[in-house]
Amino acid sequence: MKESKVKIIIIEDEMIIGANISLQLTKLGYEVTGIIPRGEDALMFVKENTPDIILMDIQLKGKLDGIETAQRIQQEYDIPVIYITANADDVHFNRAKTTRPQAFISKPFKKLDLQRAIELTLSRMSENDNGEKNTIQEPASPFVLSDSIFVKDHETMVKILISHIFYVEAERNYCRIFSKQKEYVLVMTLKDLNEKLPDEHFMRIHRSYIINISQIDEVGGTYVIVAKKVIPLSKTYRDELLKRLHTI
């Protein structure tokens, strides 16, 4: 059976902003089931079209703001909420925390911010309280071949030639693969990814970086340069890197 797309509703009173977010989500492979401008309308919509994730603007027109709307929804449903707001002051943030949101994104935000917030939410949803798998699947781990790796990009698995990969950068529980074609985001730790990548091509040189050894342009005392990117080189890895370079 084909897995259904993740359903997301956008609760946003600025329809131009809502439409723009909807377009971004659609390109990322998600299904936007509604753009709702008012909290009161959102309560009715959720009853009839229960989503997997809610993107909630804190400032809404009408009697209910986004936080109050989330509180009302949470009285009946266990739906993850991601807040988006232009007002990220301490008062609103502290109020929002009481609803246990999955993320808090400040406007204006980049497409990557939105993508990461949703992927992190999905990874948290991948197991329920009983430890059983839900129907929403965690993004697939990369599949490694001798000359390439396959990574999940939106709804498809994309082949990346190892020779085209420059380096990998860690950001908390994410990894960003920088290649000749584009940048890919994986929901996994650098340590886990390092265990999957072939040792003959890749080496971890810092707690936050893995490099493709064949792509090194320069090695300094405390750094390497790959694709014009200056990457820090930890002392603990420097001798090993120089040793490996002498054998290439």
Image (spheres, rainbow, N blue to C red):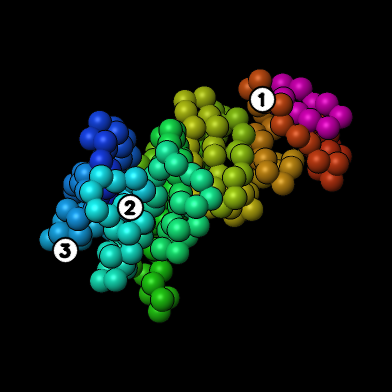
Could you say which disc has been placed on residue 47 in the image? 3
Q: Amino acid at mark 1?
A: Lys
- Distance (Cα) linking label 2 and label 1: 41 Å
Query: Where, quadrant-wise, is the N terminus in this rendering?
Result: bottom left
Based on the displayed image, in which of its 4 quarters is residue 155 positioned?
A: top left
Question: Which quadrant would residue 17 be assigned to in this image?
Answer: top left
Of callouts 3 and 2, the N-terminal one: 3
Please name the residue that numbered disc 1 is placed on.
229
Decide if residue 213 is on the left or right side of residue 97: right
**Bounds of the magenta segment:** 216-225
Q: Is residue 39 above or below residue 153?
A: below
Q: Residue furthest bottom?
A: 130
Query: What percent of the width, then of the height, locates residue 138?
Result: 40, 57
Q: Amino acid at mark 2?
A: Gly
- Residue in the picture at 53% in, 29% down: 179
Residue 113 seen by the camera: yes
Residues at marks 1 and 3, CA–CA distance in whole angstroms: 50 Å
Verify CB contact (< 8 Å) between mark 3 and mark 2: no
- Magenta-drawn stretch, dominant element (helix, strand or loop): strand
Q: Secondary structure at mark 3?
A: helix
The circle drawn on residue 66 is 2
